[in-house]
Amino acid sequence: MSADRNNPAADTGLIVQNLFKSYESAGQAVSILRDLDLQMQPGQATCITGPSGSGKSTLLYLISALDRPDAGAIHLLGTDMIASSESKLTRLRNEQIGFVFQDHHLLPQLTVVENVILPLLPIAGVDSAAEARAAELLERVGLQHRKTHRPAELSGGERQRVAVARALINRPALVLADEPTGNLDPETANRVGDLLLELTAEQQTMLLCVTHSVELAQRFPQHFQLEAGKLVEHNRSVTSADASS
Ligand code: ADP
């Protein structure tokens, strides 16, 4: 299936259509995503909530082509995220997708600024422009004074702010955030959530966040719940009429 060229998200956004994914468990296929649709355009921020095990991380793996769906179509910036070659997908992932995880995934032996620059290495290498960009982002996340520190010397909230800067260093088209505030106290969580929203909006980056935190989701302009393998707008549960249609 190809993305519809008349669709405004076709070349610049994300289009997920009729996505199905199941996993084998004890010899049985367990259906996780069932006919899921999602569409995003530059600058859009969307949050998906759902209980643990509902398939939130699975959806992010599929969108970033780290896993394959059973059926359906995914296009990011016009690229087919299912049928394209592995080398094309790796390049697209490196250049156009920034990741923020629950556990910051910073490398302990590198300094803060080296961690932020890391995603640029396979693309442009490190030059003075990369260093200036990292310095600018560290300033934006309020950590310019921590550049030469190691992750172990930072608080949990500071580490997540470094992770936000690292996710944005390439000016990606899409940031995927998986429980980005999961390990933080509520006040720090709000600050990290706001920072993600602010910086992605400034750069016109799409932000797709998955979390069990309804409080974080409420800060987003768009909030879906993952229910029975599909996305439904928050506060609008799947009814029997929807289910039979
Ligand atoms: P969430 O992020 O909402 O907590 P996940 O997407 O991690 O949920 O997982 C959804 C379901 O799929 C869970 O029941 C999980 O055990 C199962 N699952 C995820 N990845 C795999 C896998 N590689 N093999 C088998 N089952 C998996």
Image (cartoon, rainbow, N blue to C red):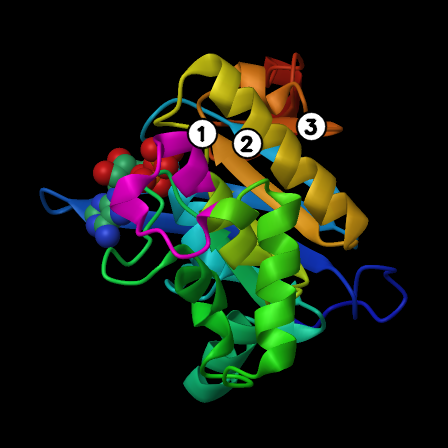
Q: Nearer the viewer, residue 157 or 229?
A: 157
Residue range corresponding to the magenta coloring: 146-160
- Going from N to C along the chain, the mark reached first, 3 or 1, is 1
Say which element carries label 1. Answer: loop
Residue 78, horizontal then vertical, whole percent: 71, 73
Residue 134, horizontal then vertical, whole percent: 58, 63
Q: Which mark is residue 181?
A: 1
Mark 1 CB near ligand 1 (8 Å cut): no
Q: Nearer the viewer, residue 95 or 12?
A: 95
- In the rendered image, residue 149 lying in the magenta stretch gets the answer yes
Give the residue displayed 33% in from the left and 26% down from the top.
Answer: 52
- Tags 1 and 2 in contact by the CB under 8 Å rule? yes
| Ligand 1 quadrant in view | top left
Say which element carries label 2. Answer: helix
Q: Which mark is residue 220?
A: 3
Foreground mark, 3 or 2, reads 2
Residue 89, horizontal then vertical, whole percent: 50, 78
Q: Is residue 208 above or below residue 191?
A: below
Say which element carries label 3. Answer: loop
Task: State left or right for residue 93 relative to residue 171.
Answer: left
- In the rendered image, residue 53 lying in the magenta stretch gets the answer no
Q: Quadrant of the C terminus?
A: top right
